[in-house]
Amino acid sequence: MTLVWGGCSREELKKAYDDAKSKTEDIATSTKQKVDTAVSSTVTAIEETLPESGSITVRGSLPIEKTSKARLEVISIGDGRPNVVQILSYDPEQQPMTLPAVMLQGPTEVESAQSLAGKSIECDLYFQATESGPVVMTKPGGHVVVTFNGFSADEGTITARIAGGDVVSSDEQTVTFLGGEFIALVRE
């Protein structure tokens, strides 16, 4: 029995194979570029809809107009002790610390940031406006009340008002604290 190749020589078959291989590679490259572009566009769209990085505003005799970020975390202590809600305007693991710096910290029975909405928590307050400026804090045994407004699951943020309170300054100057507000990214 004789096989008929339809008049194709070995060179023509190799050329057809090389052409098919080249077209497949071109399609793969084009598809990868399209997927990369789509992913990049999606990431950009998501980043545009996400909130900035939060902010805290503090008013008083040493005002902090607005920090560039704020994050909230509910920390589980365990052993029957209350959890702690902590709001920071800086990354404690990054040095030097970003100024102005604000920290609010208080005990709570809630276990998640979502559960804070509508609740008020007594917090210790610490803030420093500038590198050479004093650290302002609540008086020993004192606190400021933080009232949480709403939690946005879509944005992963929570908003709150900070009531005024009695504070002291590390340079022993008289300082007033009139309150403030924040929008914080929730860290789970």
Image (cartoon, rainbow, N blue to C red):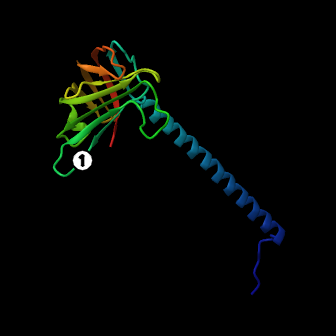
Q: Tell me where residue 178 appears, x and y as whole percent.
A: 27, 14
Kind of residue at disc 1: Ile
Q: Nearer the viewer, residue 85 or 186?
A: 85
Q: Residue at x 46, y 34 (%)?
A: 47
In this picture, residue 40 sits left or right of residue 128: right
Q: Tell me where residue 82 appears, x and y as whole percent.
A: 18, 43
Q: Tell me where residue 174 appears, x and y as whole percent.
A: 30, 13
Q: Residue at x 47, y 24 (%)?
A: 131
Q: Residue at x 79, y 63 (%)?
A: 15
In this picture, residue 171 sits left or right of residue 120: right
Residue 41 sits above or below residue 1 on the image: above
- Name, please, the residue furthest toward the bottom: 1
Q: Residue at x 24, y 41 (%)?
A: 112
Residue 4 sits above or below residue 145 on the image: below
Crowding at mark 1 (Cα within 10 Å: few <14, some 14-19, many 20+): few
Q: Nearer the viewer, residue 97 or 108?
A: 97
Q: Tell me where residue 99 appears, x and y as whole percent.
A: 45, 26
Q: Quadrant of residue 120?
A: top left
> Label 1 belongs to which residue?
77
Badge 1 marks a residue whose secondary structure is loop
Q: How many marks?
A: 1
